[in-house]
Image (cartoon, grey):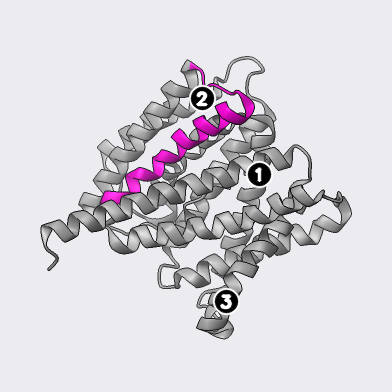
């Protein structure tokens, strides 16, 4: 049993890794938002996937390619990879039209979608308190979307569809908990890259050297972010570190202001407060009912 001082040190280490990991994911999303204004989404997915696989290759070789890619429930893994590729594409489409913080706020509703969908899809029981929290969270989503007149743009609809798709991937991942983290990350990275590569030749725009480097950075940053979050969950309980995933919104607001001069309005801030409060409450109730470790391979939106 660890001494209290050691436990506190591990928790600080875990929190630091989680915050740094989420900051890298948000940086990844911000770079993607900037690049998607210039290059087609399939091209971004292809180059990002290739760069990520180059980083993962030594780990895959060390573990053994057959061991990494031979998984149980291959159809479920294929479905998950397809959903993740769709979700990432929807994310990049949404940030092309909306401020980064707006999209990140809508994506934060994914755990609430998971709670609602777990009843019909997984047969789980959700109590009245969690249903109330889900309802409050969806009110927050409506505040961000502001569904009056023609305010709901295609970008907002893409973000909402991406958040819902992300929720489906989280639910599907629950049935794949026995799969190793390296297998999960490698399969989704390879799948996203191949999905982009299938279309990229038809929409390819020759990138400048600087832009090509940034496209590659997307892949590197994503892998490092996964490593940090894996480390966070390895050294600290999920109940301690998972709430810090919401720090991504702070990074998104800061980068949105610094790069695009985007400042969230009162609607977005109010919606974000409701979504975060609801998400934390649902997480707390689920931890009390049956503590389940978070899946780090699903941490990043884009």
Nearest the eye: 39 or 153: 39
List the residue tagged with mark 3.
58
From the top left corner, tell me how far across and down residue 287 is, in percent.
25, 51
**How many discs mark residues in the rendered view?**
3
List the residue tagged with mark 2.
144
Looking at the rendered structure, the secondary structure element under dot 3 is helix
* C-alpha span from label 2 to label 3: 42 Å
Magenta residue span: 240-265
Task: Kindly identify which numbered label has been placed on residue 252.
Answer: none
Q: Is residue 300 above or below residue 260?
A: below
Main secondary structure type of the part rendered in magenta? helix
Which mark is nearer the camera, 2 or 3? 3
The residue positioned farthest toward the front in the image shown: 210
Of labels 3 and 1, earlier in sequence is: 1
Residue drawn at x 49%, y 55% is 225
> In the visual, does 141 lie left or right of 233?
right
* C-alpha span from label 3 to label 1: 25 Å
């Amino acid at each position: 049993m660890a001494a209290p001082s050691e436990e506190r040190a591990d928790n600080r280490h875990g929190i630091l890794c989680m915050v740094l990991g989420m900051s890298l994911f948000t940086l990844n999303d911000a770079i993607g938002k900037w690049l998607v204004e210039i290059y087609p989404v399939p091209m971004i997915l292809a180059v990002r996937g290739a760069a990520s696989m180059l980083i993962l290759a030594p780990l895959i070789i060390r573990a053994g390619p057959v061991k990494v890619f031979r998984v149980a429930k291959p159809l479920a893994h294929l479905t998950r990879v397809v959903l993740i590729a769709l979700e990432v594409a929807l994310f990049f489409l949404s940030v092309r039209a909306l401020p980064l913080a707006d999209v990140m706020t809508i994506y934060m509703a994914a755990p609430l979608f998971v709670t609602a969908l777990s009843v019909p899809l997984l047969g789980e029981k959700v109590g009245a308190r969690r249903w109330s929290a889900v309802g409050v969270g969806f009110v927050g989503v409506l505040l961000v979307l502001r569904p009056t007149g023609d305010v709901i743009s295609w970008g907002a609809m893409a973000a909402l569809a991406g958040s819902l798709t992300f929720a489906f991937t989280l639910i599907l991942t629950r049935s794949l908990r026995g799969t190793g983290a390296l297998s999960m990350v490698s399969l989704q990275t390879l799948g996203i890259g191949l999905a982009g590569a299938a279309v990229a030749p038809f929409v390819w725009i020759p990138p400048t050297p600087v832009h090509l480097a940034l496209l590659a950075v997307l892949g590197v940053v994503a892998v490092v972010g996964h490593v940090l979050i894996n480390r966070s969950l390895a050294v600290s309980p999920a109940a301690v570190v998972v709430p810090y995933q919401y720090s991504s919104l702070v990074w998104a607001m800061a980068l949105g202001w610094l790069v695009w001069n985007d400042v969230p309005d009162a609607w977005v801030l109010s919606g974000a407060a409701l979504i975060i409060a609801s998400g934390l409450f649902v997480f707390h109730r689920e931890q009390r009912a049956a503590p389940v470790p978070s899946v780090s391979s699903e941490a990043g939106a884009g």
